[in-house]
Every structure is written in structure tokens, then in C-alpha cells.
Image (tube, rainbow, N blue to C red):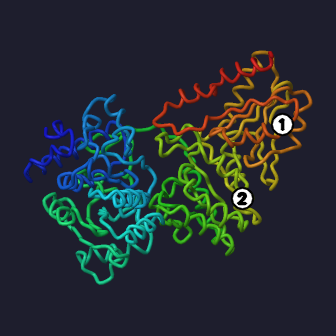
Amino acid sequence: MYIENINSPADLKGLDIEALRVVCDETRAAIIKRVSRHGGHVGPNLGFVEATVALHYVFNAPTDKFVFDVSHQCYPHKILTGRASGFYGDDDQMNAVSGFTSPAESPLYDNFEIGHTSTSISLATGLQKARDIKGTKENIVVVIGDGSLSGGEAFEGFDEASELGTGIIIVVNDNEMSIAENHGGIYKNLRALRESKGQCGHNWFKALGFDYQYVEEGHDVEKLIAAFQSVKDTDKPTVVHVHTEKGHGFAPAVEDKEGWHWGNPFDPKDGSRPESPASESYEELFSNWMLEQMKTDPTIVAISAGVPIGAGFDAAKRELAGAQHVDVGIAEEQACAMASGMAKGGLRPVWSVHSTFIQRTYDQLAQDLCVNQNPAVVNVTLGGIGTMNDITHVCLFDIPMLCSIPGLIYMAPTTCEEYFAMLSWAVRQDRKPIAIRVPSNGVVHSDAEVDAEYSYEPSYKIAKKGSQVAVIAAGSFYQKGESVVRLLADKGIDATLVNPRYLHSVDAAVLDSLKAGHKLVVTLEDGCKDGGFGDRIASYYGDSDMKVLVGGIKKDFYDRFDQQQILADNRLLDGQIVEDVLRILSR
């Protein structure tokens, strides 16, 4: 194998074209081996193998700087920069390599931690400016997929790179796909450029001031090398537009490009995956509920920002929804502002967004939505410790972030029945923007009665009345609260259990009522405790005799963590919480 002996891009330089083609084949096989055993981003990486081999053959990393947008195309780069064992090695070797570019992993070849989209060109313009001021001569090379061009920061990066006017090379990997299909006006021009082999009169990149070159044969390493050699050491902003096929070289990924964007382990022979036990998911339940509502209410619209499957809207359901489903591309800012405008115009929009991505649009939430008090609904998914766990995808910060915005009601259902009751109320009400944190601990059912109507002011629900200790357990941690209360009962403590239902503010009446007969309040939230829900309760009790034990995750950027270990480190295992309660009470 060639790739076993490639420890840096310099090892490619002496190979001829035929040998480079073998390197491409081995690189693709290594990717398939890793993702079939370890899971990860499949289609985008398979489609950028030849281009990566050509880039590293032509340019001189680490002197020349590479920036990979969203990192969905960085696996071939990792293989060629000394990390091939993370793709063909054993499980420990695979676990040592992340799915995203990471300077912590490779300070020489990975310039940034990147896991969110559309940031690459902006980051690279910083390297461009630094090079220009220092007077050095290295190439700055950006790799960005066509799907990432729908994000507003990509345009800002293009705009600034053109303004700087010096050498930067932006490789646009055009595989005609985002995670799902592309959405946005720029894709009309990309299609025209593909159909004209780069020759059409209207050229978005040239209009912004870029030199432009088109490569139709995005899997021909020889032609790619020629294209990259022609722009190496340029002193002008330059775009190389490369047409590739998502999933290239692996038939299942080519046939179902959306389904194979990312995937769990599979059989590399045929792409089959082990049968999973049938189970409910909020994605499926939510999309089914929305489609039912749409049948009788044409004003209900589902919004997604590049990840429609994250709300259960696969291709078939998107077709069923028709005009009542809008995917804005990977542009959360647009989704938020558009939802506000829809609500102002008399529609009932529900925007579904993963916790880790909602932080990309803080200003639109504050200014475009909440200042205007338009009654859009934000469906926040995957919030909590048990969801995504890469450093760029940590889902712990939505509670502190959203709860800091005036005028936004943030609700935390504890069961499936409570979630849909809150969602139904939020969609029907017409006074306030409402965010709902979808439970992330699985679909938990309960036959307990849930309210059909909700107040605009926080209204906590006392589920069990006791004394000495009150456990206020929010959302996905409510079942943890139930367990803690049971364990305390075994210790002779009849604790109160409270379902707060609202995260953004406190129910003063309930908190005041707990002062009688209680010495300690325990708050539990599935997220960052710094600035979170529990901090508000602790602040409320600040000048009283009530003690407060705030349970949550310490603020930090965690990377590929073990869930149980993080819970243990933060004293959030059920037994640890009971130990801490007993310790405080014994003082």
C-alpha cells in the first residue's frame, strides 16, 4: 500500500500519475473501512478523494495553508497528513482521529477546529491578511462545498477576499448537493456554469472579482493537478470550481446521496446496516404531527436550515408538505428571520434546529424575532449531554443562550405527551415567540395529565409534595429527578418533585412556597449550568436561608466525551446527587 508510507504530503511528490491513481483508490478504501466500522461522513469525503490528492501533490503543506469548510471533506486530507492509521487501523487508532479538522490533533496540517458550515473563507481571509502583512508567500487554499455557499458567512468571506485583492485560492467542490438537495438562488448559477463547462456569461464568482477556472472531471487526478498547478502562487483572488460526485466510488452512497451524507457503521460489501430494534423518535413523531396539522391548516409551515431530516422531513415527507415545508439551506440566520416574517404575515411557522446550530443566529433571535415579538415557534432538537459529542457540535449551550434573550419563552417538556401539548399550544397562540426544547433522552410516555393551555408567565408544576428537599428537574433530566426522589425516599427523605416546564424565568410563587418546610432546593438541567436555569433559581434565593444545589454541566468545550464520565465528573449520577444532598443536610 502506498498510503502506509505516506507520512506527509511531501511523500506524494515523487509519484507518477498512475501511482497517484492507486493512492486515490487506497484512500477511498481507507475511508470506507473507517466509516463502515466507526461511522462518520461518507458521501462528501468519498467525492473529494482525487481533488485532495491533487491538492497535496501540487501545494506544499504545511507551509501552504489549507482550510476545510465544515470538515465534511477532510478525511482524505487526514490520510495524507500522517493519520492514515486512523482509517485502516484498529479501533483505538480510529478513535484517536476525529471527524473534523483539529489543530489539537495535527497542529501542522489542521489550522482550525471546524465543524459548523460556511466559515472557511472568512477564517482564511485572516490567514491571507496575516501573510500579506508579514510579507510571506505561502498559498492560502480553501475547500468549500457547494452546500456551504448557502450560508451568509460564505458570502461575507468572498466579499472580504475580493476586497483584500491578494492571492487566495477557493476550491468550490460542487457535488450538486448539500446534506439534502441545495436551496437558494446561487445554485442556478452553479448549474449554468456546470452546463456551460464554466463558460456561461453570468458568473457569480467573476462578478465578485475572482479569477475563475472550471474543472468538469472532478475525479481525474491528472486534470485536477493541471488546474491547481495553473493557479499555484497566484497573486489574485481565485476560484477553482470542481464538479464532483457525492459518494463517488461506493454505489450505495451514489444512489442515495442524502441518506449517505453521514451514517452509522455498515457492511462495506453492500452498504447494509444491522437491523435496529424498532423505536419511536421525536423526528418521526414531529414530522407526522406537522403533516397532519398541514392537512387542515394551510398556514402551518415547517422550516429547516439545511438539515430537514433532523426534523423527520425526509424526501417523501418534503414532497407531501409541498409549499408548507421550506428549507433555506445552511443558513440559520435566514431561517430565524424568515420565521419571524412569516409569523408577522399571518402564518404559523415552526423552525426546527439542532441545539449546536442555533447559536449561529443569536442576533436574529434577539433582534428579528424577539424585539418584534412575532409568534414563531422554534423547535430545539438534540439539546443535552446525550446527543452529539464532538467539540464543534456540543449541545450544551442553548439554555444559557436562549434564556438570556428578553421576550422569548423557552419551554422544557418532560414527556412525549407534554411535548405535543406544548407544541400545539405554541403553534396556536399568537402573542409571543416560543422555543421548545425537545426531550433528548428518548421518547418517554406518561399517563399523567398534561395541560392543554399554557401561561405566558412561568408556571411550575409540583408533581409530588414533600418536605426538606425540593428537586426541580427540567426537561430531559426530569426522569433523573424522579430517580433521585425515589433514592432519597430510601434514605428517609420525602422530597418534593417539581416539573418547572419553563426555563427562561422563575415561578416566584412556587419558589416562595418551598421556603416553608424545605431546607434545600436541587436543580437539574441537561446543559451548561453556568448562566443556565439553575443559576436563575439560585439567584432568586440569594438573600434567603434556602440552600440551592445547582446540577448541570460545567462550562467547557468537551470533545468526544463519554457521557457517563461527564455526568460523573459533574456529580450528576443519581447516587452522587443523593450523596451531595445528604452531605448538605448534615451540615
The CA distance from mark 2 to mark 1 is: 30 Å
User: Which image quarter is the N terminus in?
Assistant: top left
Q: Residue at x 16, y 57 (%)?
A: 221
Q: Is residue 464 visible?
A: yes
- In the picture of the structure, the residue carrying the numbered disc 1 is 541
Residue type at the position of mark 1 = Tyr
Q: Is residue 513 left or right of residue 399?
A: right
Q: Relative to the observer, which residue lies in front, 403 or 159? A: 159
Question: What label does residue 586 carry, if any?
Answer: none
Q: Is residue 331 above or below residue 116?
A: below
**Residue 94 sits in quarter:** top left
Q: Residue at x 78, y 53 (%)?
A: 452
Report crowding for label 2: few under 14, some 14 to 19, many 20 or more residues within 10 A (C-alpha). many
Residue type at the position of mark 2 = Ala
Q: Is residue 99 above or below residue 329?
A: above
Q: Is residue 465 above or below residue 172?
A: above
Report crowding for label 1: few under 14, some 14 to 19, many 20 or more residues within 10 A (C-alpha). some
**Residue 325 sits in quarter:** bottom right
Q: Secondary structure at mark 2?
A: helix
Q: Is residue 10 left or right of residue 259?
A: left
Give the mark nearest the N terminus, 2 or 1: 2
Q: Is residue 425 visible?
A: no
Q: Secondary structure at mark 1?
A: loop
Q: Is residue 421 left or right of residue 224?
A: right
Q: Relative to the observer, which residue lies in front, 541 or 339? A: 541
- In the picture of the structure, the residue carrying the numbered disc 2 is 426
- Residue 240 place in picture, x, y as percent: 26, 66
- Residue 145 place in picture, x, y as percent: 35, 60
Q: Residue at x 62, y 48 (%)?
A: 398
State the residue lying farthest toward the right.
516
Q: Which of label 2 and label 1 is nearer to you?
A: 1
- Residue 567 place in picture, x, y as percent: 58, 29
